[in-house]
Image (cartoon, rainbow, N blue to C red):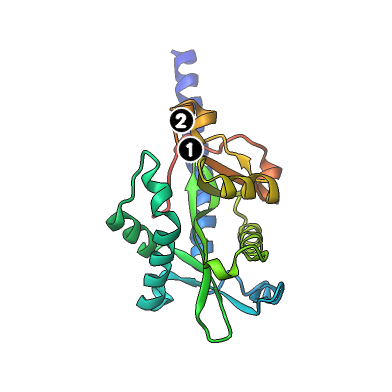
Amino acid sequence: MGRKSNRAKEKKQRRLEERAAMDAVCAKVDAANKLDDPLSAFPVFKKYDRHGLNLDIECKRVSALSPITVEWAYELTRANMQTLYEQSEWGWKEREKREEMKDERAWYLLARDAESTPVAFCHFRFDVECGDEVLYCYEVQLESKVRRKGLGKFLIQILQLIANSTQMKKVMLTVFKHNHGAYQFFREALQFEIDDTSPSMSGCCGDDCSYEILSRRTKYGEASGHAHGGSHCGGCCH
């Protein structure tokens, strides 16, 4: 009975430790989501004045955006991405995409011109993926007139700064394999790696999937190594 009792105690202790670790992860995500402005610590990044552009950068919750701005973001995403979605196993689902972009957990990093007209955005969230606290970038979309001027790279670098300042372990995103320009941009220009949770790495569907999950670790992710803090994949803090 003594050996069996010890095993039961050890199992219970492991469960308590795992729960405590997950509580700590969720506490970091909750703290990040309570910020008024994640960009406030980096005032120098609130301007982009390069390559003929003079833009103001702001970071806001979706609830703080006007319906006109949210609709603009959706329409830009549709114009840039609908064909790529239709070429994948996902297909383009308007209602689901609108709901995703209006979800109360959504944050937006916006670039506006001198007339306060939005010209580019990132939609991101603080969340939990497979036991890790992460900043997940859902969209990075630019109007054609501001592309190839370094703005996209600048916005992603801001996300990396925010992820570090909020103690997230990595920045994550999903990219279509057939979106060759975007795939090359993230892998080569921004040095994102194929994440352990990506289909090609996890073996769930491999080459049959039309997308990869990419990530770049923050200093907190590098310090903790590549092991997952838990087995649960998906958000837990809401």
Residue at image coords 64%, 62% = 148
The x, y position of residue 39, in whole percent, is 61, 71
Secondary structure of the residue carrying tag 2 is: helix
Identify the residue position indicated by label 2 in the image. Answer: 12
| Secondary structure under the numbered disc 1 in the rendered image | helix
Mark 1: amino acid: Leu
Q: Residue furthest left?
A: 95
Q: Residue at x 53, y 86 (%)?
A: 115
Relative to 45, 204 lies left or right = left
Furthest-bottom residue in this view: 115
Q: Nearer the viewer, residue 24 or 8?
A: 24
Q: Position of residue 205 (x, y in %)?
A: 44, 27
Location of residue 98 with respect to 37 vertically, above or below: above
Which labelled disc corresponds to residue 219? none
Label 1: how many Cα within 10 Å (few below 14, some 14–19, many 20+): few
- Which of 177/216 is in front? 177
Quadrant of the snapshot with the C terminus: bottom left
In the displayed structure, would residue 179 be above or below residue 206? below
Query: Mark 2 and 1 residues: CB-CB less than 8 Å, in contact?
Result: yes
Position in image of residue 181 (x %, y %): 59, 49
Say if residue 55 shows up in the picture.
Answer: yes
Q: Is 190 above or below relative to 111?
A: above
Q: CA distance from mark 2 to mark 1?
A: 6 Å
Residue 25 placement (x, y as % from top left): 53, 49
* Viewer-side residue, 12 vs 36: 36
Disc 2 marks a residue whose amino acid type is Lys
Q: Which mark is residue 16?
A: 1
| Image position of 141 (left or right of 54) | left
Can residue 35 be seen here? The reply is no
